[in-house]
Structure formats: structure tokens, C-alpha cells
């Protein structure tokens, strides 16, 4: 008996009878969602709705299942100083909400960055004290720092956040918030750097 195993390792399953559409029907989807929540499901298969056509009448129920399973990170609040000087450390307080039913099980870093007026990343720091594997369903406060480089030109910068794939150092997790840039980072605030 391992009631909390899902906090450290995946929970998965598949749809009964080899018939995913049956369990995604309007008559059955609430029970399927309940089971996904109770078992903290991160994946389904091999009996999964992979062959359900996109846009089918089951699409709303399939979307509800996808938004329930696994992790779903929402950055609900950000607090930081609006001004910094080159060489400063910018303290950033964040409130993250995992709206899914499971954590993310890999040690991927949270990055904070500053983008200049042209959108180029001018400074970036990994939040060493933040472990996203601990973001269980519900809200989690996170504190991080961003070092403002000593030679950074004065100006208005966009504060960015991203969860990086350690294999390539690039943003690898899509957040359930607005503000996503083409590079996968999310605009979460502004900072004026004074010369």
C-alpha cells in the first residue's frame, strides 16, 4: 500500500474495455475525471483516445481530461521591485498554482530573465532554490533572484520566466498562462534599469 507514491513517481492507466470513446462520452466523462483526480493520473495508454479525431463531438470532454491529468502550471502572482541598478540582485516572489493532479517529476530549473526593448534576452539566472518537483496540486510560493549584470545598459526590460529543459537549456514546459513569447519564455513583469 503506497497511498502517496504519486508525489514521487508517475501514476497511469488506460480506459477499460479498449473503448476510450465510451469513457469520454457525456454520460461517463465525470466518472473518468473523478478517477483521474483520485489516482493522480499523469498518462493513459495503451487504451487511450489517440485515434479520436480532433474536433470530434468528444473534443470538449477530451480537453477536460487533458487539463486534469498530470501537471498544469499557472503563475498567479508575481512581486518584484520595479527598478534595479546594474550589479543589483532582483528578488522575485511568485505564487504558482498546479491545477493538475500530479507534480512534474523531473528536476527542470526555473529561469528568470530580462529582455531588452528588441526582445533579446539580456540577462538570465536559474533559481537554484526552486525545485518544481515539489509543486504538488495546489498553490506553492517560490522565491528567486535575478542578477542584473554590471554592464547592463539603462532602460526598460521585460521580466521573463521559463521552465528549462536541461538537455538543451531552452524553455520546455508550456504554462497555462498568457504572455508566451516565440522562444517559449513568458512575460511576467517589467523592470526599469537605471544607469
Image (cartoon, rainbow, N blue to C red):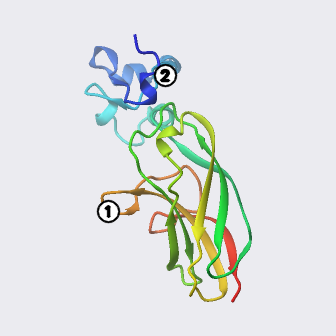
Q: Is residue 1 above or below residue 108?
A: above
The image quadrant that residue 41 belongs to is: top left
Q: Which residue is depicted at the point 29% across and 28% down?
A: 45
The mark found on residue 29 in the picture is 2
Residue 118 located left or right of residue 57: right
Label 1 crowding class (10 Å Cα cut-off): few <14, some 14-19, many 20+?
A: few
Q: CA distance from mark 2 to mark 1?
A: 38 Å
Residue 66 located left or right of residue 189: left
* Mark before the other along the chain sequence, 2 or 1: 2
Residue 157 located left or right of residue 129: right
The mark found on residue 185 in the picture is none
Residue 150 versus residue 172: which sits nearer the camera? 150
Q: Which residue is depicted at the point 47% across and 17% down?
A: 28
Disc 1 on helix, strand or loop?
loop
Disc 2 on helix, strand or loop?
helix
Q: Position of residue 63 (x, y in %)?
A: 48, 37
Label 1, on which residue? Answer: 168
Q: Which residue is depicted at the point 65% across and 52% down?
A: 94
Q: Which residue is depicted at the point 46% across and 63% down?
A: 184
Mark 2 or mark 1, which is nearer to you? Answer: 1
CB within 8 Å, label 2 to label 1: no
Q: Is residue 88 above or below residue 151?
A: above
Q: Position of residue 93 (x, y in %)?
A: 67, 55
Residue 94 versus residue 195: which sits nearer the camera? 195
Q: Position of residue 113 (x, y in %)?
A: 54, 69
In which quadrant will I find the N terminus?
Answer: top left
Q: Is residue 106 above or below residue 61?
A: below
Amino acid at each position: 500500500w503506497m497511498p502517496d507514491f504519486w508525489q514521487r513517481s508517475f501514476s497511469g492507466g488506460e480506459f477499460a474495455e479498449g473503448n476510450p470513446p465510451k469513457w469520454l462520452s457525456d454520460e461517463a466523462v465525470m466518472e473518468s475525471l473523478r478517477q483521474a483526480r483520485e489516482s493522480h493520473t499523469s498518462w493513459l495508454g495503451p487504451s487511450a483516445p489517440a485515434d479520436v479525431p480532433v474536433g470530434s463531438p468528444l473534443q470538449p470532454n477530451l480537453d477536460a481530461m487533458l487539463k486534469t491529468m498530470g501537471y498544469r502550471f499557472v503563475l498567479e502572482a508575481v512581486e518584484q521591485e520595479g527598478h534595479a541598478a546594474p550589479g543589483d540582485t532582483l528578488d522575485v516572489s511568485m505564487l504558482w498554482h498546479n491545477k493538475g493532479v500530479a507534480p512534474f517529476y523531473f528536476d527542470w530549473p526555473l529561469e528568470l530573465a530580462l529582455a531588452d526593448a528588441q526582445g533579446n534576452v539580456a540577462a538570465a539566472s536559474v533559481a537554484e532554490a526552486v525545485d518544481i518537483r515539489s509543486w504538488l496540486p495546489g498553490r506553492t510560493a517560490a522565491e528567486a533572484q535575478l542578477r542584473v549584470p554590471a554592464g547592463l545598459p539603462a532602460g526598460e526590460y521585460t521580466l521573463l520566466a521559463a521552465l528549462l529543459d536541461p538537455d538543451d537549456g531552452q524553455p520546455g514546459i508550456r504554462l497555462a498562462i498568457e504572455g508566451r513569447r516565440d522562444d517559449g519564455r513568458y512575460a511576467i513583469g517589467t523592470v526599469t534599469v537605471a544607469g
